[in-house]
Amino acid sequence: MRSRGLFVWIIPAGLAAIAGVLGYRYLRDADGTERPSPNDPPPQAHTQCPSQVVRCVKGEVRLQSGDQDAEGKCLETKIGACSAACVAEGLPLERVDDSLARAQLCDPPADVEALVAKEETITELLDDGGVCEADGFGPDGDGIVECILRSTKDPDALGIIVRRIHCKKGPVATFDRRPRTISRERAIALYCLRL
């Protein structure tokens, strides 16, 4: 009798979780640009530029050297160009070599599913999903996690991991592992190794 009552509650809870994830994904930007997270520090003038940060901007792969010009703007060097477009405009990869940066940041593959070994959603993860600190997708372990914050008003609130995507060749070994508000497909193209 007790297991029957538990079963009755599992189905609505699972459906509510799936509806929440789908609603979140529907409301999120689909153009690949990152929206500011409530956990991101407020924009301010750089006092120090990070080095070895690579990003794709308007079809160009650019490397930050860590130096600044006279106006305090971080200096960048073009290290490559995309054939078609950036995977996700302006998103950084840290401390990856130039050839890997060009491969990951440019020209998303037509079929990103070929890069995925396995995918687990919140209903399959159950209590093993874990916690995270920002909305969106980010590299983790052997793949990518999707996180949804529990509260956008409380900056100290933790979120829950609602999806794990295991990459066939593993994730890009970047030091910046913060989740980003980009689409699932762009996250796979950016964070699952393609080389």
Image (tube, grey):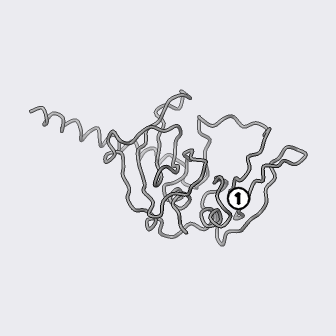
Residue 40, compared with residue 65, is above or below; it is: above
User: Residue at image x 83%, y 47%?
Assistant: 73
58 left or right of 121 in image? right
Residue 147, compared with residue 85, is above or below; it is: above
Report the front residue among 54 and 106.
Answer: 54
Q: Which x, y percent locates residue 138?
A: 52, 49
Residue 58, compared with residue 2, is above or below; it is: below
Report the front residue among 135 and 66.
Answer: 66
Tell how many labels.
Answer: 1
Q: Which residue is mark 1?
A: 57
User: Residue at image x 77%, y 63%?
Assistant: 78
Helix, strand or loop under label 1: strand
User: Residue at image x 50%, y 29%?
Assistant: 157
- What amino acid type should be assigned to the residue bearing mark 1? Val
Q: Which x, y percent locates residue 117?
A: 40, 62
194 left or right of 102 in image? left
Q: Which x, y percent locates residue 101?
A: 64, 62
Residue found at the very far left of the displayed protein: 1
Residue 127, compared with residue 181, is above or below; it is: above
Q: Which x, y percent locates residue 177?
A: 56, 47
Callout 1: 10 Å neighbours few (<14), some, many (20+)?
many
User: Residue at image x 51%, y 70%?
Assistant: 110
Residue found at the very far bottom of the displayed protein: 83
